[in-house]
């Protein structure tokens, strides 16, 4: 069914039922793709608070056959030399998925710093390997959940360590968690 054939659709109080009746048209779309494809239905679902049921926004959800968007990025070496703007231009869906999951900062540096971790080249960060990600995650308890302390002993910035911990659901102390850092000792 073409969108041009649908001049006016009446959803009543349940646009979600319409969504599922025509699911084959929307299957596999991200929220942004769905919004561009059918803005009227998207707005109705949002208005009736049913968008989450139609298109769930799950962190670290499967992405193009990979466990998550970071895994997809790491497996495609042609993407590693891109900056944020380049990735956005080449693959907006991947960019937005990584941004939503909190993994964009792990894969591509946000800023160019003089005193940054090893591997920084011309303002871009080389993506972390699985063993590097494991090293950072495994350091969580060793440094009392403190990314600044971990950065003193590991070859990564505190911001990158914090982002990796956050991406796997670990809460860090310091920087916004001052109460926890004061009272955790």
Image (tube, helix red, strand yellow):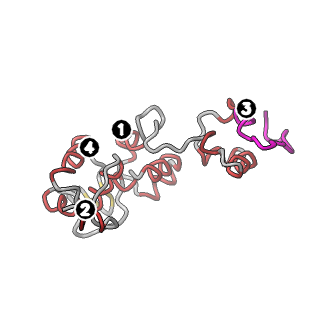
How far, Cα to Cα, is label 2 from label 1?
25 Å
Image quadrant assignment for residue 150: bottom left
Q: Count neighbours of disc 2 (C-alpha within 10 A) and say few if under 14, some if 14 to 19, many if 20 or more.
A: some
Q: Which mark is drawn over residue 158?
A: 2
Q: Is residue 117 above or below residue 21?
A: below
Work out whether mark 3 precedes mark 4 in sequence or the reverse, and give the earlier one: 3
Which numbered disc, 2 or 1, marks the residue closer to the eye?
A: 2
- Residue 129 numbered mark, or none: 4
Query: Quick one: 90 or 105, which is closer to the camera?
Result: 105
Verify CB contact (< 8 Å) between mark 4 and mark 1.
no
Q: CA distance from mark 4 to mark 2?
A: 18 Å
Mark positioned earlier in the residue sequence (4 or 2): 4
**Start and end of the magenta stretch?**
1-21
Real-space Cα separation, disc 2 to disc 3, in angstroms:
47 Å
Q: Which residue does the numbered mark 3 point to in the structure image?
A: 22
Residue 13: percent from left, percent from top: 78, 44
* Mark 1 Cα-neighbour bin, 10 Å: few <14, some 14–19, many ≥20: few
């Amino acid at each position: 069914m073409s969108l041009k054939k649908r001049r006016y659709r009446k959803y009543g109080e349940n646009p979600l039922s319409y969504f599922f009746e025509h699911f084959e048209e929307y299957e596999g779309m991200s929220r942004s793709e769905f919004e561009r494809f059918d803005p009227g239905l998207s707005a109705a679902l949002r208005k009736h608070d049913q968008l989450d049921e139609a298109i769930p926004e799950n962190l670290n959800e499967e992405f193009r056959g990979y466990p998550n968007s970071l895994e997809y990025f790491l497996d495609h070496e042609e993407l590693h030399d891109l900056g944020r703007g380049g990735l956005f231009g080449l693959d907006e869906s991947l960019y937005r998925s990584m941004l939503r999951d909190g993994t964009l900062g792990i894969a591509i540096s946000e800023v160019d710093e003089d005193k940054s971790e090893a591997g920084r080249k011309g303002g871009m960060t080389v993506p972390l390997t699985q063993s590097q990600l494991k090293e950072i995650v495994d350091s969580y308890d060793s440094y009392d959940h403190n990314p600044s302390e971990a950065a003193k002993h590991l070859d990564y910035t505190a911001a990158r360590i914090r982002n990796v911990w956050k991406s796997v659901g670990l809460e860090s102390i310091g920087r916004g968690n001052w109460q926890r850092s004061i009272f955790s000792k």
